[in-house]
Image (spheres, rainbow, N blue to C red):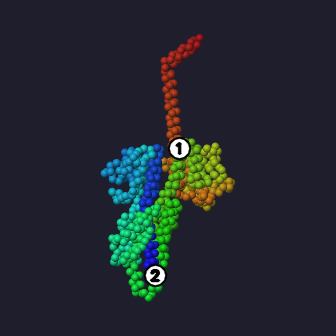
Amino acid sequence: LEQQQESGQILARILARTAFIVESFPAEMEDAIAEQMVIEATIASHFVAAAEAAGWTPEEINTRLREIVANTTLSEFWITDEKGHAYLRNAADIDFTFSPDPVAQPQAYVFYDLITGRQKIVIQQAARRDYDQKIFKYVGVGGVDKSRIVQVGYEANVLESLRERVSLNRLSKELVEGGDIRAIRVVNQGIETKVFQAGPGPGVKEELNLTDIEKLTGVLGNGQSTAYQDGGYLKVLEPVFGADDRTVSGAVMVYLPTDRMQAAILRQVTQAALVAAVILLIGAAASILLSRVVTRPVITLGRAAHAVEQGKYEPSLLQDVAARADELGDLGRVFDRMAQEVSARDRRFQLLKVIIPLGVSLSAEKDFNRLLETIVAESQKITHAEAGSLYLRTDDEKLKFVIVRNEPLGISLGGTSGKPVTFSPVPLYRENGEPNQNHIASHCALTGERVSIKDAYQSTEFDLSGTRAFDKASGFHSQSFMTIPLKDTADKVIGVLQLINARNDSGEVLPFAEDEVLDSVGLITSAALSAYVREESLRQEIDKLRVEIDLVKQTKQVQEIAESDYFQQLQAKAQLMKQKRAGK
């Protein structure tokens, strides 16, 4: 009986811990997702403000929004004007205007407070939409440039699936159907039954008796587990603790049948010692099996949750648990998917802390040479590159070196260094008119595609003889390359950024990671360079127009002087004096 009680306590303790995880996990994950969505909406608000300030059309902005939706987990963008009309959105076929009327828009009206300024942030719980029954979660922020709604949303079926599949009721049913447990009950702090599963057999009622209520009251009050025999059952009670591991939020009651054991004792009194030994062995085996089957996966899930909290989650942590075919395997697979989404959002958040300052720095720079130098220097810093070069496309279809930097060799040419770049330009086309595809930079400019080389001394795709000659003369060793096209708003390549030798924290040279960092670097540097070129072109046009206006004004003034009465009189006197001199 004591062994059975111990096994029951172990099982009840696991169920109590599982109850807390099942109840709290979906809500905590939704809160974490909401925090990331606030960040994404804020970034979208800044992006739209910057894009409109740069003169982008709504269609250009919507194209970028559709690209973001196609390549990320975000599903929708709804960005309005001051009247609530969502003129910027990824869904081109839906024309939507937000209304403050809760009757007209029961779900969407709360976001109208972002226009009036009564709210800065609105977070809406995941809910089923009226018109298509899809589960969506929406978060909105106000505009940074004017009164508007900037709303992001994503289809949150994974949250609903998590609630449906990670069910304590379902787990209890599986355990009861095994036959060793007659019933499982879960109650809340008010001793209201939230989960009840019972197997076949007499004496198990859904209603609690007075003894049950008394024992449950004690467990809920002191937070201590207990067990007692009631009829033909051993009832084991275990408290369910909240997030602080101190507050008791409910209790688990496990019904273990004792009729089999009592019958065996009555039939085999003479073999009591043997029966006791067998029971002990069975109990030990059951405990070990229970530990392997349930306890270890739960401990593994706890470690995985801690890894997510620390930002160090790896899918291999739950590989064994996710491979199981039971309920814990389902929980492991759901947890793994959610953990990977959280890790991805955390990486994007860390990326934003690097990329946003870079974008602000580049957009504020007014000195062209310093802008070019900053593009290369900051790109090296973000990607941990030893060297970097920047080419600009010229009118005669060549790539001209404008910045060359190599930190190990102490080389800094172009920009504000005062030292000219002496390297010859790279032609985009050969003398016979064929595209120059052998050079990395020219290939990148001609195709508009990023080029990554893991090892320059192993690659045979491009002509790297110039690189190897430079290494031989300088003692430098070029290994990994990342070449990025820089495009204007018309998607024309206006320059090329090349980075060399990405290093990790231990100083080892690695291939460049083709991730969101490089995508963001390319977009931001392209935008900054393109914006400066457009601004400089506009400034030159204004100066040219000013000169033309001054010439017209000067010509008009000369004409007015020549046609004045005073000038005509002077001209007549001069003519008379000339005639008198001729008469002498």
Location of the N terminus by quadrant is bottom left
Distance from the alpha carbon under mark 1 to that under mark 2: 78 Å
Q: Secondary structure at mark 1?
A: helix
Along the line of sight, the residue nearer the viewer: 122 or 545: 122
Note whether residue 243 is visible. Answer: yes
Q: Position of residue 252 (x, y in %)?
A: 41, 69
The disc, 1 or 2, on the residue closer to the chain's N-terminal end is: 2
Q: Residue at x 47, y 62 (%)?
A: 339
Q: Which residue is mark 1?
A: 364
Q: Secondary structure at mark 2?
A: helix
Picture coordinates of residue 452, whole percent (x, y): 56, 57
Residue that numbered label 2 is attached to: 279
Q: Is residue 440 visible?
A: no
Residue 361 vs 578, above or below: the answer is: below
**Amino acid type indicated by mark 1:** Ala
Judge by depth and name the residue closer to the eye, 29 or 322.
29
- Identify whether 239 is placed above or below 413: below
